[in-house]
Image (spheres, helix red, strand yellow):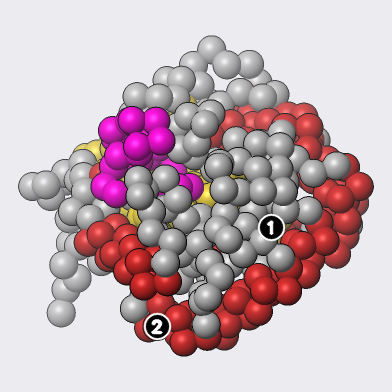
Amino acid sequence: MSSSSKLVIRNIGMILTGRMEEPIMDAECVIAEDGRITAIGKEDDFDTSGSTTEVDAHGTTLSPGLIDSHVHPVVGDYTPRQQQLNWIDSTLHGGVTCMISAGEVHMPGRPKDIIGLKAMSIAAQRWYDNFRPSGVKVLAGAPVIEHGMEEHDFQELAAAGVKFLGEVGLGTVKDGKTAGQMVSWARKYGIQSTIHTGGPSIPGSGLIDADMVLETGTDVVGHINGGHSALPDDQIKCLCENCKAALEIVHNGNERAALLTLNTARELGKLDQIILGTDGPAGSGVQPLGILRIIAMLSSLGNVKAENAWCFGTGNTALRRSLDCGIVEVGRAADFVFVDQAQHAPGKNMLESIQLGNLPGVGMTVIDGIVRTGRSRNTPPAQKVPELTRAPPASLGGGH
């Protein structure tokens, strides 16, 4: 029985895999069937017949779609925090194909009673599962823990499909012992946790220092470089030294603290723990190119090869967050972004240009094997762009 959809991508110049141990792969062709990668290598070795979609990469670089590990969505493609429509679509034009909620905390009138917060979390998980703005995978429905929650509440949330907690510390629970118990209950039922790190960000939040982070024991040290205000240097170093959790660097944070985190993690051999987010929408606004900008910043100022820094926003996050995207590998979701050196940007090639601090140009995005966008309206124009040479009737698909 033939597959209902088959994507063939040919003439790829280079593949960024998303894996730190092998960040670059020499392959010219990728095939995906029914939204999953089925072959990577040389076109002559594969059966490319029966394709429903074909892309000529024209020598551009194929990468996993970028992952934003830390966003605060509300409903649909709208954020009341900045009164902005279509911010998710705009982020897709920055190469981000998947984003993870750290709590729907900007919902006006957000319920803080147990029944209400559970209801809103389950609803948020459902509405982004049913409606994906421009095709972007928004993994939402992240409850902020409040006093009075018991083990059965986390069991019920997990049974309903909730997979992530909102930032610990944004609710009434602000002590490590109580937070640690709730994080343990969440983990028991397969729910990942993130903790707010640093000074207060919104009314109702407060300082979360290294001691509370360590006592709580979440899966992700949320915005270790502050959101906005970072912890003192010695506390950041302490967290890097003592945490086995993901060390999340965000665009909406302290850049100096981000570089301190990177340098400390490198010295400790923990670069595989670095993941990236934007922490938007927030007071600093919406950051459609936030993940690309952090990659360029960490590579250029943090002395990291661009192909390795790229893994921070793809494979590292996928592995730490247990996602099926973020890595170019057979069996994983066919979520890609095509990038190339920006026109007139310095550097001998795209990777060198990134390491000099420049953004690449995005030429196309693909989610679940479906071409979602062509040349980005937000990045600088790429020197080369891929071409959609065969398309089903509904090409350049949007949300559903």
Residue 102 screen position, x and y as percent: 51, 55
Q: Is residue 83 magenta?
A: yes
Q: Is residue 247 above or below residue 394?
A: below
Name the N-terminal-most of marks 1 and 2: 2
Label tally: 2
Which amino acid, by three-letter code, is at mark 1? Val
**Residue neighbourhood size for the residue with mark 1, other residues' Cα within 10 Å, grouped as few (<14), some (14–19), many (≥20):** many
Viewer-closest of 210 and 56: 210
Q: Is residue 174 left or right of residue 370?
A: right
Which of label 1 and label 2 is nearer to you?
A: 2
Q: Residues within 10 Å of mark 2 (few under 14, many from 20)?
A: some
Relative height, residue 255 to residue 26 (above, below): above
**Residue 148 vertical placement versus 28 (above, below):** below
Left or right of 207? Residue 372 is: left
User: Badge 2 is on which residue?
Assistant: 156
Question: What residue is at 78 percent from the left and 69 percent from the top?
Answer: 215
Residue 289 placement (x, y as % from top left): 49, 31
Q: Position of residue 213 (x, y in %)?
A: 75, 61
| Rendering coords of residue 158 (x, y %) | 42, 79
At horizontal 52% and vertical 85% (from top left) the residue drawn is 151
* Residue 323 position (above or below residue 205): below
Cβ atoms under marks 1 and 2 closer than 8 Å: no
Q: Which residue is mark 1?
A: 221
151 in magenta: no
Range of magenta residues: 71-99
> Is residue 361 at all visible to an observer of this figure?
yes
The quarter of the picture where the N terminus appears is bottom left
Secondary structure beneath label 2: helix
Q: Kindly report the distance in space between the C-alpha atoms of the residues bearing marks 1 and 2.
A: 25 Å
